[in-house]
Image (tube, rainbow, N blue to C red):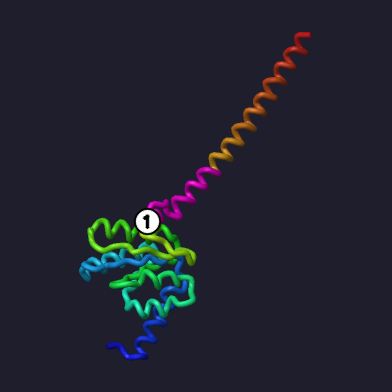
Amino acid sequence: MATRERKQEIVSELKDFFANGKVAIVTDLTGLTVHEITQFRRKLDKVDAKCRISKNTLIKIATEGGDFGAVRELAVGPTAIVIGYDDPAAPAKTTVDYLKQIKKGAIRGGVLEGKALTTDDVKGLAELPSKEQLLSSIMGGLDSGARGIAGILEAVIRDIAVLAEEVAKKNAAA
């Protein structure tokens, strides 16, 4: 059994774990082997996310009064917390896809910007495009808009040139 000092260290580590997080996903990884959990953590590392397994009482103490306070209601039974530090959709997608792939574990819910998410909300978040995909589609939209404006201006200039040429021909004939 952990000593009081060790538990305080763990709570401090958990507070640091939650400190800069954008999204928290609460999962039950019951039935996963050590190898599967290690693979899961490696996949999360690629999307700037971390997974932590801890006692529920320590998780509840660490999230008390913070943005992730709603985790307290979800921390029941075997609990693993996934924290995303950059794009909120990426850790959700990684978690949902991995648990679906190995057919083990379950998502209990999550917290995004201080608001509780249901299991369906987390799955919906996983279906959103990534930050990079959204930025590229915005840039594509801006680029196509600029091309459209350039095309319109070119057509106006061409029409003025044709009109001037017609006027010049008419004046030359007269």
Residue 36 lies left or right of residue 112; in this view the side is: left
Instruction: Identify the residue at horizontal 39%, vertical 82% (top origin).
Output: 11
Residue 3 lies left or right of residue 139; in this view the side is: left
State the residue position of label 1: 120
Q: Quadrant of the C terminus?
A: top right
Instruction: Identify the residue at horizontal 66%, vertical 28% (top origin).
Output: 156
Residue 40 lies left or right of residue 171; in this view the side is: left
Q: Quadrant of the N terminus?
A: bottom left
Q: Position of residue 109 (x, y in %)?
A: 37, 63
Instruction: Work out whether residue 52 or residue 148 is closer to the camera in this orientation and state it.
Output: 52
Q: Position of residue 4 (x, y in %)?
A: 35, 90
Res 81 → quadrant = bottom left
Instruction: Work out whether residue 160 or residue 85 is closer to the camera in this orientation and state it.
Output: 85
* Amino acid at circle 1: Asp
Where is 140 relative to 90, above or below? above
Chain part drawn in magenta: 124-142
Inspect this view and state whether residue 50 appears: no
Res 3 → quadrant = bottom left
Q: Position of residue 138 (x, y in %)?
A: 51, 47
